Image (cartoon, rainbow, N blue to C red):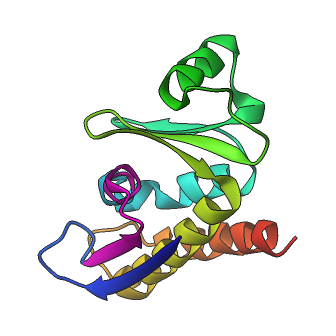
Amino acid sequence: MEWHFKKNKSTAHSIEIDIIPNNDTLASFLYTVKLIHYPELIDAVANTVSWGHEFVHVRFLNDMDWEDKAWAKNVKGCNLEEGEMFLVHDVIGETILNVDSFDKILFDYATELLKIHTDDNILPNNWSAEMQNALKSLKSKIDN
């Protein structure tokens, strides 16, 4: 899986992501999470804890109950395997992703968000610091 970014002021986060092969669910997930919620999402992913807000959800295998596993099996056609996760966008759909790939994409996307929105007056004053701390945790997970 490859991904590339480009700045685009007309998008919700002022950035576009091009994912190869195309994954509309993943791209829509990243665009739908509100900027203010990114530190919380990143912390959850860094700790391999399922997370959800409004229309988007991340479900890790270790955090799924039998109903979630049955639902994921229905989508995938077989059981989720170790190292896989379930990503949901309630409008666009669901997808199964490799956890390591998602961690890296999220890290790269959130790093770009931090660069673009560090001085954004609409976000709380501590947002940048929370993002930096969350990104450190996720980077540690990626490196280990």
- Residue 26 in the figure: left or right of residue 140: left
Coordinates of residue 125 in the picture (x, y in percent): 43, 72
Q: Which residue lies furthest to the left in this view?
A: 10
Residue 76, how many percent across, how many down? Answer: 54, 31
Quadrant of the rendered structure where residue 117 is? bottom left
Q: Is residue 43 above or below residue 139?
A: above
Q: Which residue lies furthest to the top in this view?
A: 67
Q: In which quarter of the image is residue 14?
A: bottom left
The structure residue drawn at horizontal position 74% and vertical position 67%, both measured from the top left corner, is 137
Residue at position x 42%, y 66% from top? 21
Relative to 7, residue 128 above or below: above
Residue 45: give x, y in percent of width and height: 65, 53
Count of labels shown? 0
94 or 116, nearer to the observer: 94
Does residue 49 appear left or right of residue 74 in this picture?
Answer: right
* Span of residues in magenta: 15-29
Q: Is residue 138 left or right of residue 14?
A: right
Residue 120 lies in quadrant: bottom left
For the point 36% across and 49% down, the residue is 25
Rendered location of residue 37, percent (x, y): 44, 54
Q: Quadrant of the C terminus?
A: bottom right
Q: Which residue lies furthest to the right in this view?
A: 144
Residue 65 drawn in magenta: no
Per the image, is 16 magenta? yes
Toward the front, the furthest residue is: 77
Residue 121 vs 94, above or below: the answer is: below
Using the image as rendered, state which of residue 107 and residue 76 is in the foreground: 76
Q: Is residue 138 left or right of residue 130?
A: right
